[in-house]
Amino acid sequence: MDSEKSVCEALNFKELYDTHSDGLFGFLLYKCGDRDLAKDLVQESFIRLWSNCSKVIYEKAKSYVFTVANHLFLDDYAHKKVVLQHQKLTVKTTTDETPEYVLEEQEFLKKLKGAIADLPVKQREVFLMNRIDHMRYKDIAEALDISVKTVEKRMTLALKTLRTQIKGI
């Protein structure tokens, strides 16, 4: 990296922001359809670029912010999916189960959601896309621009981690 300049050295950061922020905003607006969220994700992407500017080669700055923005969007999307799934759970006013069973079930669901939330981002992303969105591995691979084998590996690791954590519950 001696001959290549980092973002900090190569150009005024403001100029880099001015050059790429509108395109990044359009990209995110297309993905999420929410202007405020798109603005927030653009800002967060450039904050992360600024935090890592000495490590990022100037020629790769655009790719870096778009990749970071995409990951931020996918994290936000995965979080919203969990929230929506939680909201869909309807609470029955009467039940045939004992109060102890209902309490254990609620505790288990809480711990399961915590275990899913604790998965590494890439594993959680693949797990939620498959189990919540019901996407096939091939579709997940295309959406994330990775190979099907990578999707399989991430899913295997996610399931292994969840099984281990659930045994302890």
Image (spheres, rainbow, N blue to C red):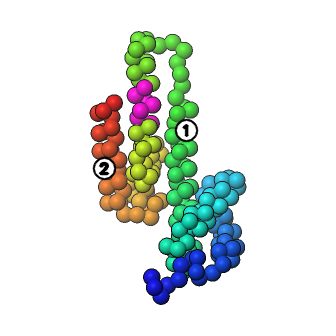
The answer to whether residue 81 is above or below residue 49 is: above
**Which of the 4 image quarters holds residue 24?**
bottom right
Q: Residue at x 56, y 55 (%)?
A: 73
Tell me if 76 is positioned left or right of 98 in this view. Answer: right
21 drawn magenta: no
Where's the C terminus, which quadrant? top left
Q: Is residue 59 above or below residue 68?
A: below
The reply to whether residue 21 is in sight is yes
**In this picture, residue 34 sits left or right of residue 91:** right
Query: What residue is at 44 percent from the left and 36 percent from the top?
Result: 113
Q: In front: 156, or 148?
A: 156
Give the residues in magenta.
107-113
Horizontal arrangement in the rendering, residue 71 relative to residue 109 (left or right): right
CB of mark 2 within 8 Å of CB of mark 1? no
User: Residue 83, which numbered label?
Assistant: 1
Task: For label 1, count other residues whose C-alpha is less than 10 Å away and answer few (under 14), some (14-19) or many (20+).
Answer: few
Q: Secondary structure at mark 1?
A: helix
